[in-house]
Image (tube, helix red, strand yellow):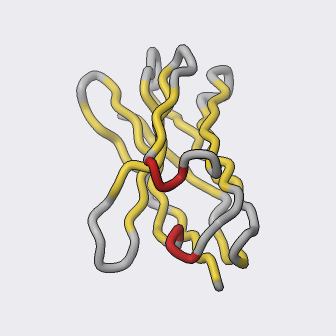
């Protein structure tokens, strides 16, 4: 079992920044992929960014150049630095990982960007 605990969401004005954190605990040996998805009201959950253990990253086109994903393997923590936030970034952000073939999700942290 893997537990994911997110933090860092909140209310911010357009153009502002937030940093999300997600700490993994439990049976976390050899976690390779960690990342972030988001779900806006009335929309499907979508990929925001992924990072693998060697540092390769993948971003949704809508966040490229504004968001940066990073990880601290020693702390089993993944971060999402979000800059130049837009109202359309408003969503619940979910931490994600895959371990022994099973997907795990955090409880979600809400990000609200006001115009």
Q: Residue at x 25, y 32 (%)?
A: 102
Residue placed at 67% from the left, 77% from the top? 11
Q: How many marks?
A: 0
Query: Is 2 located above or below residue 92 in the figure?
Result: above
Residue 43 in view (yes/no): yes
Q: Residue at x 28, y 22 (%)?
A: 100
x and y, in percent, of residue 104 in the image: 34, 41
Q: Is residue 68 above or below residue 72?
A: below
Residue at image coords 63%, 65%: 9
**Front-most of residues 50 and 63:** 63
Report x, y in % for residue 63.
53, 52
The residue at the far right in this view is: 16
Above or below, 83 relative to 72: below
Q: Is residue 106 left or right of residue 101?
A: right
User: Which quarter of the rendering shows the N terminus?
Assistant: top left
The answer to whether residue 36 is seen in the rendering is no
Q: Left or right: where does residue 65 sit relative to residue 99?
A: right
* Image quarter in which the C terminus is found: bottom right
Front residue (pair 11, 100): 11
Residue sitting farthest toward the left: 101
Q: Position of residue 47 (x, y in %)?
A: 38, 49
Task: Return the x and y of residue 31 as percentages of the image width and height.
Answer: 44, 22
* Depth check, front residue: 61 or 110: 61
């Amino acid at each position: 079992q893997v537990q994911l605990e997110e933090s860092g969401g909140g209310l911010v004005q357009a153009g502002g920044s937030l940093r999300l954190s997600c700490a993994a605990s439990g049976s976390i040996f050899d976690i390779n992929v960690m990342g972030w998805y988001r779900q806006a009201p009335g929309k499907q959950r979508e990929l925001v960014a992924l990072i693998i253990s060697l540092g390769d990253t993948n971003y949704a086109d809508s966040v490229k150049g504004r968001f940066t994903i990073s990880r601290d393997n020693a702390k089993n923590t993944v971060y999402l630095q979000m800059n130049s936030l837009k109202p359309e970034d408003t969503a619940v952000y979910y931490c994600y990982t895959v371990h022994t073939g099973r997907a795990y999700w955090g409880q979600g942290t809400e990000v609200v960007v006001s115009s």
